[in-house]
Amino acid sequence: MNYWLMKSEPHEYGWDDLVAEKEGIWDGVRNHQAANNLRAMEKGDRALFYHSGKGPEAVGIVEVSAAGLIDPTDETGKWPTVKVKPIEKLAAPVSLKAMKADPKLADLAIVRQSRLSVAPVREAEWKAILALAGE
DNA sequence: GCCAACGTTGGC
DNA sequence: GCCAACGTTGGC
């Protein structure tokens, strides 16, 4: 089981949109580092759903429901994607500020490189974030 | 193949 | 709205 963090602008595609759809496809990634992370995902992996922009915070947990897909919006047929489904909304959202303030999360990929839209999360980091969420 | 210029993303 | 970080493009 691997853990990830997936970032989205809530105005473009937010947690509520995913819940309404029941399953979402994570298309539109055109960044090699993020794409490599998408390729490394396996069905059953868990990811934090993170809202970027104003008041950036992790809001929910999703599960990878299909992995190893090709982005249907990609004309070249090369960029990867996955499908995710919502598991649960966090009891309390975890702000980027709170993550940055936690010494256990000092090496978190998203803290170190804010522009990465799909980032790995270590198991210890995952647990630390859930603790911050009051889970 | 290097590097400067430019564009985009995302936090503040 | 600004700026830092990063990626991409294009001239040489």
Image: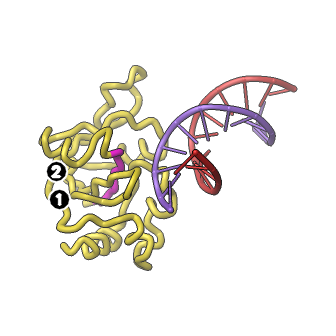
Chain colours: A yellow, B purple, C red
- Circle 1/circle 2 CB separation < 8 Å: yes
Give the label, 1 or 2, closer to the camera. Answer: 1
Question: For the residues marked 1 and 2, what is the alpha-carbon distance in whole angstroms?
Answer: 8 Å
Q: Residues within 10 Å of mark 1 (few under 14, many from 20)?
A: some
Residue A41 location in percent, x, y?
31, 49
On screen, residue A27 above or below C11: below
Rendered residue at 47%/73% (across/down): A106
Q: Residues within 10 Å of mark 2 (few under 14, many from 20)?
A: many
Q: Amino acid at mark 1?
A: Lys
Viewed as shown, does residue A127 lie left or right of A78? left
Residue A8 included in the magenta stretch of the image? yes
On screen, residue A80 above or below A97: above
Q: Quadrant of residue A104?
A: bottom left
Q: What chain is tagged by disc 1?
A: A
Magenta residue span: A2-9
Tag of residue A86 = 2
Rendered residue at 36%/50% (across/down): A7
Residue A62 location in percent, x, y?
21, 53
On screen, residue A128 above or below A25: below
Query: Which residue lies under the disc numbered 1?
Result: A89
Q: Amino acid at mark 2?
A: Pro
Residue A24 location in percent, x, y?
21, 39
Co-location on one chain, circles 1 and 2? yes
Q: What chain is tagged by disc 2?
A: A
Magenta stretch: helix, strand or loop mostly: strand
Tell me the quarter of the image containing the N terminus of chain A: bottom left
On screen, residue A125 above or below A53: below
The extreme top residue here reads: A75
